[in-house]
Amino acid sequence: MKQGLDAPICLTWELTYACNLACVHCLSSSGQRDERELSTAQAKAVIDELRDLQVFYINIGGGEPMIRRDFFEIIEYSISNKIGVKFSTNGAFIDQRNAERLAAMDYLDIQISLDGTDAATNDAVRGEGSYATAIRAMDNLKAAGFGQFKISVVVTRHNVDQLDEFKALADSYGAQLRITRLRPAGRGADTWNELHPTNAQQRQIYDWLLAHGENVLTGDSFFHLNAFGESLPGLNLCGAGRVVCLIDPIGDVYACPFVIHDTFKAGNVLETGGFTHVWRESDLFTELREPQSAGACASCGAFDACQGGCMAAKFFTGLPLDGPDPECVGGDGEILLASVPVALTPRPSMDHSKPPRHKVNA
Amino acid sequence: MTVTLESACELHPQVALRPEPFGALAYHYGNRRLVFLKHPDIVRVVKTMGQHSSLRDALMAEGVDETRWPSFVSALSSLTTSEIIRVL
């Protein structure tokens, strides 16, 4: 699998950089629509290609994907081509009518993003009113008989103690809980220092995941924690460019959803040869499929378990890619981090954040 | 469910197979499970087993050496758990 697949298993497609929210850890620094955003026809051509590649399902995100006027047209087109859709949303557009429309569709999964089991914890990260918005969307999905949707949580220093409550909340809706790792990507690069779980909390996450096994989804994002001992369920490797990739709203293809940066841009779906050419032939993906050096981690007994962790987390914190993850459970990343000057950490290549609102002093 | 050499099995109708260098990927559109079939022989057996009245017949028809049958039985049993195949 490290040599790559003929087509991705897990393809994320951010449909738009437009968003009604401005989460402080947004991986794609979303806010404003990019005028180069793929048109409906271009999006459908991408779906045609994914169908020919036998991609089984796509993960749609943004921005807020439901902001696009052709959102339903795109997902219906995908599903009618036997490509299942799983989309992430903040829920703002899941009113009663849309909930019913979504409930009537097959091969559709919905992930509602929620980062706290109370408004104060959630809204501190996702913005004022976003907790109420998410709960309303979940109520609407439940009332419409959608069935099992997912609640998707980015684990931070401030909500890690709520894991049991998140599980109870999901259970109360007949929903499935999904928890993922906070990445220092996009606006998350600016907030990671304050938000990422402490070393003790990492152990807490690991123990909690071991206890809950396959009932909780993780997107296999916590494999760096395998260095604690027993492996967590899932694919224990960085899938960037091997089994995973990202198509961004303007059609640029990146190695994974957490590395929107020129260094990890493999091409664009609008170029000759399209996505297929990028996936199979691009220099970047070819390189990522070659055996990677363990570097500074080579002599560590835990390397087989953690695989050196997350490439994106290392990149955006300024660490070498062939060394420990910044959240290395052995503490090696933390030591290295202390020596990285803040000025030298890479910045995201694109920023679609809305301009800050300036308060006018009356 | 345990599969035996006498079981008649078939690929689940909601499962799609995608060829890959190592064998194939199997995806179940109903339960959303993704499974790696890590050998071309298992892929061939899974594809054709529905046409045979028993697993034994399917293995013979695909020319799988008898010494490997026990490993096929156990691999196919685990594929019933994820409903990639089903016993008829």
Image (cartoon, rainbow, N blue to C red):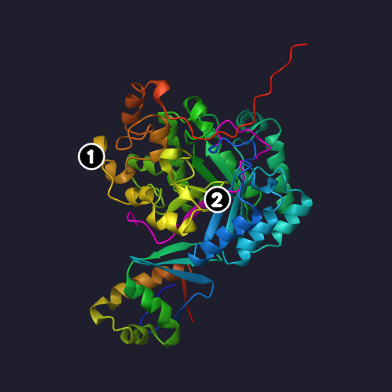
Q: Quadrant of the N terminus of chain B?
A: bottom left
Q: What type is the residue that disc 1 sits on?
A: Ala
Percent across and percent down for residue A69 are 72, 50
Q: Specify whether residue A309 is painted magenta.
A: no
- Asked if B88 appears above or below A111 in the picture, the reply is below
Q: What type is the residue that disc 2 sits on?
A: Trp
Question: In the rendered structure, the residue with mark 2 lies on which chain?
Answer: A
Residue B46 located left or right of residue A80: left
User: Same chain, marks 1 and 2?
Assistant: yes
Labelled pair 1, 2 in contact (Cβ < 8 Å): no
Residue B70, numbered circle: none
Q: Secondary structure at mark 2?
A: strand
Q: CA distance from mark 1 to mark 2?
A: 34 Å
- Asked if A215 appears above or below B15 in the picture, the reply is above
Q: Specify whether residue A8 is painted magenta.
A: yes
Q: Earlier in the sequence, mark 1 or mark 2?
A: 2
Corner quadrant of residue A353: top right
Residue A147 visible here: no
Residue at (37% x, 79% y) in the render: B4
**Camera-side residue of A252 and A128:** A252
**Camera-side residue of A174 and A12:** A12
Residue at (31% x, 45% y) in the render: A305
Percent across and percent down for residue B49 are 41, 82
Residue A298, numbered circle: 1
- Which residue matches tag 2? A13
Task: Give the main secondary structure of the magenta stretch.
Answer: loop
Corner quadrant of residue A80: bottom right
Marks 1, 2: nearer the viewer: 2
Q: Secondary structure at mark 1?
A: loop
Which residues are drawn in magenta?
A1-26
Residue A81 located left or right of residue A333: right
